[in-house]
Amino acid sequence: MRELEAKLSQRIAAPDATAQRPSILLIGIGNYLMGDEGIGVQFIQWLAENNIQLPDTDILDGGVGGFTLMGHFDSYDKVIFVDATMDQKPLGTVSLIKPRFSSDFPKGLTAHDFGLKDMVESMYLLGRVPELYLFTISIEEIQPMTVALSPAVENSIPVLTREVGQLIQQLATPETV
């Protein structure tokens, strides 16, 4: 576990003075001890364990951080969240939305939705709001005291990896006029 923590710490470590700071932050949200509800943090850990490199992107295991995550956003132009949702879609469905306000978040965000939605509203009040993206993975239930993912949710990781990678590639590519 310490090795994984070290990898994640390196992925968001302050760059040296000659390096350009990545403009994208990828955050996995969720409770690791609640089964499928922890898919966001399990996804971030999977990226670190498999040494998946995403251009111009720092990754962060956000856990159920809520307001405590706000300090991480100031340095980034774009923030991508990955989180579980109980949205009645088939188990393991990967969806992307671009929320602007808390009302744009799915109603079925799981156990920490109050903190995530309120955090977005607070960013608007403070006047510094990066471009926000939210990948959701559909789950059916929260399973307390387990780190195991259901097969359908676990099988969504390659799809999620591909879709997150495609979005990052689009965001990292400078637009031509």
Image (cartoon, rainbow, N blue to C red):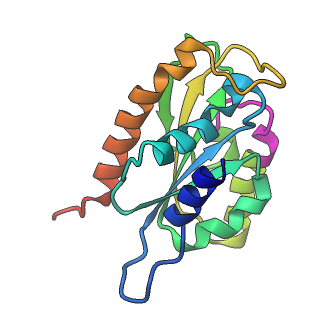
Name the residue rendered at 33%, 58% in the picture.
Answer: 55
Q: Name the magenta segment's main secondary structure.
A: loop
Was residue 113 drawn as part of the magenta stretch in this picture? yes
Q: Would residue 141 be visible to someone looking at this image? A: yes
Residue 163's spot in the image, x, y percent?
37, 35
Name the residue rendered at 73%, 46% in the picture.
Answer: 117
Q: Would residue 108 be visible to someone looking at this image? A: no
Q: Judge left or right: residue 19 versus residue 7.
A: left
Quadrant in which residue 158 is drawn: top left
- Seen from the viewer's position, the closer of residues 83 and 18 is 18
88 in relation to 112, above or below: above
Numbered range of the magenta stretch: 105-115
Name the residue rendered at 69%, 69% in the picture.
Answer: 71
Query: How many circles with numbers are drawn on the protein?
Result: 0
Given the current orientation, which residue lies at the most extreme bottom position? Answer: 17
Residue 3's spot in the image, x, y percent?
59, 53
102 in relation to 111, above or below: below
127 in relation to 114, above or below: below
- Seen from the viewer's position, the closer of residues 60 and 6 is 6
- Seen from the viewer's position, the closer of residues 157 and 103 is 157
Residue 79's spot in the image, x, y percent?
52, 56
Q: Quadrant of the C terminus?
A: bottom left
Residue 16's spot in the image, x, y percent?
44, 84
Name the residue rendered at 79%, 19% in the picture.
Answer: 143
Given the current orientation, which residue lies at the most extreme left position? Answer: 177
Quadrant in which residue 165 is drawn: top left
- Seen from the viewer's position, the closer of residues 104 and 147 is 147
